Image: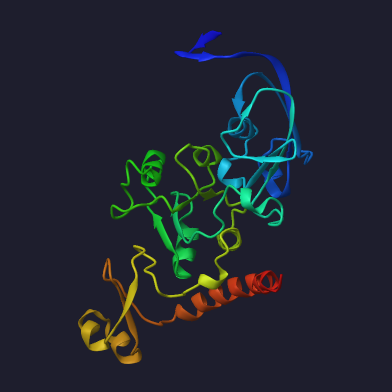
Amino acid sequence: MRIRKGELVSEVSPFTIRLSFHGDLAFFLKSKSGNKIVERRLGEKTSVKDVIESCGVPHPEIDLILVNGQPVDFSHILECEQEIDVYPIQSPHTLFQENRLQVRIIDRFIADGHLGKLARDLRLLGFDVLYDRDAQDRQLLAALSIEKPEIIGAREGLRSRALLTRDRWLLMHKVVRHGYYPRSQDPTEQTIEIMRRFDLFSSIAPFTRCLRCNALLEKVEKADVIENLEPLTRIHYEHFRRCTGCRQIYWPGSHFDKLRARIAGIRATLAPESQSENQT
């Protein structure tokens, strides 16, 4: 036995691990050739999670791990030469369905400071997205931790939220249980990715959440808000909603058609996929 950092670590003979990454997980690999097979030479017992993440693939992106053809979880210890297959969420659900590592449907999120347009789009579609463009990584992680349910919103149990970020190292942090790394840098494409990953098509509820603060909207009578309206708005509009949080007032103004067209475009892209899944 030898001592390392105050712990006893068993010495083992060096061994090679061969990892095959399936689906779109090759996106995270360093290989420019598109090769989905990686070999790692190890000199001590190591968890399969650590080996996979050393290849650049965050654990929230992984839904199934097979070691020599048998399913394991992230804590599985590697100590000899083995073949490892790593699958994303999009892998066939008939393959070891009872051994999946991720929750497929999540509709509550935390977005990092670089994803403001994505956060706004998801709120437009009715989804609960905590977002603060000035939030630091430690604050995002604190919001995901059971021990420290703080920052970016009211104190609440945030364990069921998924972290949305294009920082793969942040996504690898041990307190992150659920999350996603948007592949595209285009906000609309990012929104479609999130909808696909978390199976949210049937949960779309447009214009029900405040784009500014994320709180729910409530219908209000014109008479109740008329003192807060501009003169032309008082004349031309009759239907209003008010944020239950910041009290922002919404109505179907000149921007409304553009927002509806944006929602319609997202729905049109996802609808055929949703219909196909329902038929299988």
Residue 60, placed above or below residue 131: above
* 223 vs 172: above or below: below
Instruction: Name which residue lies at 22% across and 88% down.
Output: 223
Residue at 62% across, 45% down: 62
Q: State the image coordinates of residue 17 (x, y, percent, origin top left).
A: 72, 27
The residue lying toward the viewer, choosing from 255 and 137, is: 137
231 on left or right of 45: left
- Residue 239 lies left or right of residue 163; in this view the side is left
Q: Where is residue 210 in the image (x, y as percent from the top left)?
A: 36, 68
Residue 128: x %, y % from top left: 41, 62
Residue 280's image quarter? bottom right
Quadrant in which the N terminus is drawn: top right
Q: Residue at x 35, y 52 (%)?
A: 157
Counting labels gives 0
Q: Which scheme is used to colour this image of the protein?
A: rainbow
| Image coords of residue 73 (percent x, y) | 59, 39
For the point 58% across and 30% down, the residue is 50
109 w.r.t. 126: above or below = above
